[in-house]
Amino acid sequence: MNAAIQPEGDARLRDFIDANPRLFVITGAGISTDSGIPDYRDRAGQWKRTPPVTYQAFMHEAATRRRYWARSLVGWRRFGRAEPNATHHALVALERRGQVELLVTQNVDRLHQRAGSERVVDLHGRLDEVRCMACDWRQDRHAFQQALVARNPDFAALDAADAPDGDADLEGHDFGRFDVPPCPACGGIVKPDVVFFGENVPRERVAAAIEACQAADAVLVVGSSLMVFSGYRFVAAAAKAGKPIATVNLGVTRADPLVTLKIDAPCAEALAFLA
């Protein structure tokens, strides 16, 4: 199924939504740019920067953990204060119309929940919480920020441009002296409760998403290029099952050959009719 991109995109999207009362919604980084959180890829689907840290490097290299948490200390000050934008609120309105079977987000900012969405699966976890990889001790990210700052007051005075992962482009500094707090319960490695590259998405999240995708009438993708397989798999399964698929994204998506409707426009503009 091919789809031409036409200027009346929002009207065609309205028709798509009206025709499919149970929607499986997938969202990505493109919906949070209006909240001040940078996205990962350009219009061609290519990385705008060095890819994020991998699970293997974080767990096995102390230097990687020091660099990650130093950058996170600086970036969290703004990321942790980000507010939902018009796109988040539009999807809340869609849920309140009873049309969201499930919203699966690849984002870790929890802005859907803060906007009021309830039927949400955080596919890649949440950045507002940290956990011990040994004993599963957990703590609010704001509290962990206080521990980071207390141990590293010099870094607390630094600033840098925001990066997509809640960290900052903090370069040219000696991370070797950065002091990362261990788990206070067992001394283990503390990691943000997000799925890093090279780490598996928990089975229960995938299972919940698959079940909802199967029950839905159609799939709506908002603000994602779907270049990461963890999100693309659901679109591929829906296409195989013959379900209609609509994408709202600036630029290409991995699913372009599969979609029924492609809207190449800013998310808030395309979904404004829901407000």
Image (spheres, grey):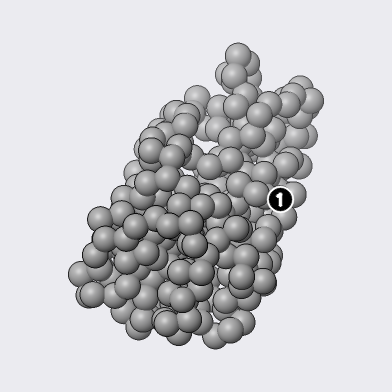
Judged left or right of residue 159, residue 229 is left
Query: Considering the image in quadrants, where does the N terminus appear?
Result: bottom left
Disc 1, SS: loop
Residue 2 lies left or right of residue 250; in this view the side is left
**Residue found 31% across the figure and 54% down from its top:** 256
At x 58%, y 35%, the residue is 163
Work out which quarter of the rendered image holds the C terminus and state it: bottom right
- The residue lying at 30 percent from left, 55 percent from top is 255
Residue picked out by circle 1: 82
The amino acid pointed to by label 1 is Ala
Whether residue 239 is visible here, answered yes or no, is yes
**Looking at the picture, how far across and down is residue 213, in whole percent?**
35, 75
Q: How many marks?
A: 1
On screen, residue 247 above or below 186: below
- The x, y position of residue 81, in whole percent, is 74, 49
Up-down: is 221 above or below 18?
Answer: above
Seen from the viewer's position, the closer of residues 150 and 71 is 71
Quadrant of the rendered image containing residue 149: top right
Q: Is 104 drawn above or below residue 266 in the view shown?
A: below
Which of the two residues, 264 or 232, is positioned nearer the viewer here? 264
